[in-house]
Image (tube, rainbow, N blue to C red):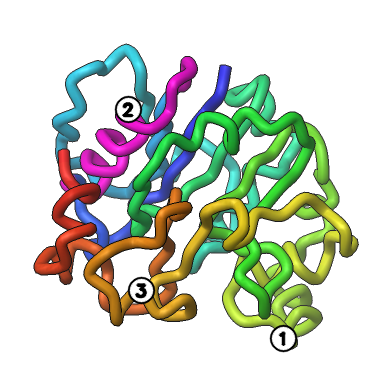
Amino acid sequence: MIDIVIYQWGDFCKPEHVEILYAMCKRHIHCEFRFNIFTDNHLPYNIKSRSHYRIFTQQDYESGSISVRCYRRLWLFSKKAKEHFPDKIVLLDLDIVICKDITDIITTDVEFAAYNKGHVPYQGAFIILKPGSRTKVWDEFDINTSPELCRGYPGSDQAWLSYILPPGEKVFTKKDGFYCYDVHRLNQRQILPERAKIVFFRNVPKPWMIRDKMWIRQHYRL
């Protein structure tokens, strides 16, 4: 079973954004998967197939003192996470646009893989993880000392991943159809490159803010 995992925390990203991401996954993933939402939001989600998704709250997992920023996602690398996700985790950011079939991507047979757009080896926006592997990511993290160790990288969880994991892990890049909205200048285009499969948004605007663009209207929808 492939477990798609997303985090919807606070008020910036809303349940409707979760529902749109689920709809994109349904359109562009052609294998069995389960959708998992980690959230502090108690509003109902309008995902129709309730048997195909689960909701976890802050109380459902051990995050301790790292429940700030994206550090909370590091718990997925813990040994305990395997109890909830036995086979494969695919961690996705909420602010992405899936444009084409990504079945071949998420079924890649690896213990770990991540998006790489150049300046950070392992981006937190897209991660494939075999639960129970790379557990030192969680075991060696200390909220009091680890952020200082990885100051050379931007971000929180992705900075720690890039520091603690060795070079040479599997990555997905532009050649695999992974594009970044501003880095690859999609902000200047109305039409996507033919090979684009996923578009990532590292800053504002987010896809729900710029639906005037034709390709966003086409793909970012229920």
Q: Residue at x 58, y 62 (%)?
A: 174
Residue 119 percent coordinates (x, y):
67, 79
Q: Is residue 110 visible?
A: yes
Residue projecting furthest to the top: 51
**Considering depth in this image, is 215 or 87 the residue closer to the camera?**
215
Q: Is residue 40 left or right of residue 129?
A: left
Is 64 placed left or right of 96 in the picture?
Answer: right
* Amino acid, disc 1: Arg
Looking at marks 3 and 2 on the same chain, the residue that comes earlier in the sequence is marked by 2
Q: Rounded to the nearest whole Å, what is the CA distance between mark 1 and mark 2?
A: 37 Å
Which residue lies at the image location 52% right of the left edge and 53% below the top edge? 177
**Which image quarter holds the N terminus?**
top right
The kind of secondary structure element at disc 3 is helix
Q: Quadrant of the C terminus?
A: top left
Helix, strand or loop at label 2? It is: helix
From the viewer's side, name the closer residue of 142 and 77: 77
Magenta segment: does it hold 24?
yes
Question: Which-is-in-front pick, marks 3 and 2?
Answer: 3
Q: Which span is picked out in magenta?
A: 16-33
Would residue 174 appear left or right of 42 to someone viewing this image? Answer: right
Q: Is residue 18 above or below residue 200?
A: above
What predominant SS class does the magenta segment belong to? helix
Q: Any mark on residue 186, and which?
A: 3
Q: Is residue 44 magenta?
A: no
For marks 1 and 3, the one nearer the N-term is 1
| Quadrant of the image occupied by residue 191 | bottom left
**Of residues 62 and 184, which is closer to you in this image?**
184
Residue 175 x, y percent position in the rendering: 62, 58
